[in-house]
Image (tube, rainbow, N blue to C red):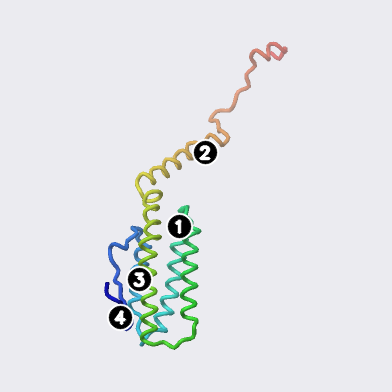
Amino acid sequence: MAQEDPKKPFVIEWRQGFKVNIDQVDDEHQHLFTLVKALNLDSVQQTVEELLDYVVVHFSNEQALMEKSGYPAFEQHLKLHEDFAGHVADFLGNGDAWTEERVQELRRFLNKWLVGHIMTHDLRFGKWYAEHIASPAAQQRQVSLAEKAAAIKPQLQPQEHSAPVQKHRGFFATLFGLR
């Protein structure tokens, strides 16, 4: 296996194989790859700032979707995002001047992390989401539950009568001399 040349740009292009089949998440992942690819020495500060802003947006959107859908591995996924943010903060906070090598090191780290994270954790979420939230069967279960709830709701509310209730004097009225 060939050794990577640290001076050669490390670029990974977005591929269909990275799709988690949740449109918003896939669009955001694709944009992250575009931003990482755009990293270069001439515009590193601007691109890094844009990348960091977008990572915050993406993580917030992805985490909100996971939490709203009841994803069972949400807390673990949140921790992965927090760990990533810590690594990036350490890298950016070390005070070193930007050089071509440092830009490539950042690009290499971001690309490897993105690919690894998407191909394991995000694909796992995408599969779970498809099975439990987005599939026709899951949607039918949600509709069925909503229909059942709608059917039960009228039974829980006081019944209205179209005609006034008549007072009947039957057996007990006769027994107690009320007739």
Q: Are marks 3 and 2 in contact (CB under 8 Å)?
A: no
Query: Where is mark 3, residue-wise?
Result: 31
Residue found 33% across the figure and 74% down from its top: 34
Q: Is residue 82 above or below residue 162?
A: below
* Label 1: few (<14), some (14–19) or many (≥20) C-alpha neighbours in 10 Å: many
Query: Where is mark 2, residue-wise?
Result: 153
Indicate the amino acid at tag 2.
Lys
Indicate the amino acid at tag 3.
His
Residue found 40% across the figure and 48% down from its top: 132
Name which of mark 1 and mark 3 comes first in the sequence. Answer: 3
In the rendering, at what x and y percent does residue 61 appear? 44, 64
Query: Where is mark 4, residue-wise?
Result: 5
Label placed on residue 66 = 1
Q: Depth-wise, is mark 3 or mark 4 nearer the camera?
A: 4
Name which of mark 3 and mark 4 comes first in the sequence. Answer: 4
Indicate the amino acid at tag 4.
Asp
Q: CA distance from mark 4 to mark 2?
A: 67 Å
Q: CA distance from mark 2 to mark 1?
A: 29 Å
In the rendering, at what x and y percent does residue 147 appear? 44, 40
Relative depth, front residue between 153 and 4:
4
Q: Is residue 37 above or below residue 30?
A: below
Q: Are marks 2 and 1 in contact (CB under 8 Å)?
A: no
Instruction: For the C terminus, give its image quadrant.
Output: top right
Q: CA distance from mark 3 to mark 2?
A: 45 Å
* Label 3: few (<14), some (14–19) or many (≥20) C-alpha neighbours in 10 Å: some
